[in-house]
Image (cartoon, rainbow, N blue to C red):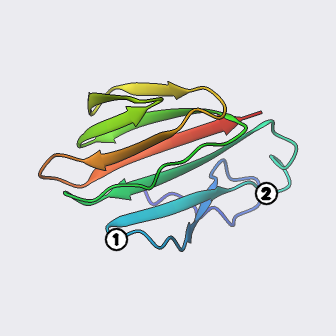
């Protein structure tokens, strides 16, 4: 059975839209919250990182959780670096610097949720 597209009124799907990022090997897909979710106190996205590539350092006013669904990463958070595998999750406090790079041989995929 083919699932209905996110545009079908009443369907439980949340759409996503690729947002341009100027980082080699990184793709970002923002989840599009429609009228049903506009007042939600959280936001979400997913992003992919090709082997050998990584993100720039980020810091922001919100709390954030990353769920790693595929790949192997080195994640640097607040001055310490950690090896992260698929199936693990990370929590970032506001204003703490963090970035990651893909240290594996397959594309990494991360789902991100953030809130104030």
Look at mark 1 in the image and give the residue it sits on: 24
Look at mark 2 in the image and give the residue it sits on: 34
- Residue plotted at (72% across, 34% down): 115
The residue nearer to you, when weighing 43 against 98, is 98
Could you say whether the residue bearing mark 1 is in a helix, strand or loop? loop
- Relative image position of residue 69 (x, y in whole percent): 34, 39
Rendered image: mark on residue 86: none
Structural distance between the alpha carbons of marks 2 and 1: 30 Å
- Residue plotted at (27% across, 40% down): 73
- Relative image position of residue 68 (x, y in whole percent): 36, 37
Above-or-below relation of 107 to 78 = below
- Residue plotted at (26% across, 60% down): 50
**Whether label 2 touches label 1, CB < 8 Å:** no
Decide if residue 66 is on the left or right side of residue 7: left
Decide if residue 36 is on the left or right side of residue 32: right
Decide if residue 69 is on the left or right side of residue 27: left
- Relative image position of residue 23 (x, y in whole percent): 41, 68
Mark 2 neighbour density, 10 Å: few (under 14) some (14–19) many (20 or more): few
């Amino acid at each position: 059975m083919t699932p209905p597209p996110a545009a079908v009124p009443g369907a439980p799907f949340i759409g996503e839209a690729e947002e341009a990022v100027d980082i080699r090997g990184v793709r970002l897909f923002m989840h599009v919250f429609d009228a049903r979710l506009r007042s939600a106190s959280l936001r979400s996205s997913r992003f992919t990182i090709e082997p050998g590539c990584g993100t720039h350092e980020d810091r922001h006013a919100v709390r954030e959780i990353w769920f790693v669904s595929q790949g192997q990463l080195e994640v640097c958070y607040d001055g310490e670096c950690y090896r992260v595998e698929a199936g693990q999750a990370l929590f970032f406090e506001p204003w703490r610097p963090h970035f990651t790079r893909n240290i594996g041989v397959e594309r990494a995929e991360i789902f991100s949720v953030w809130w104030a």
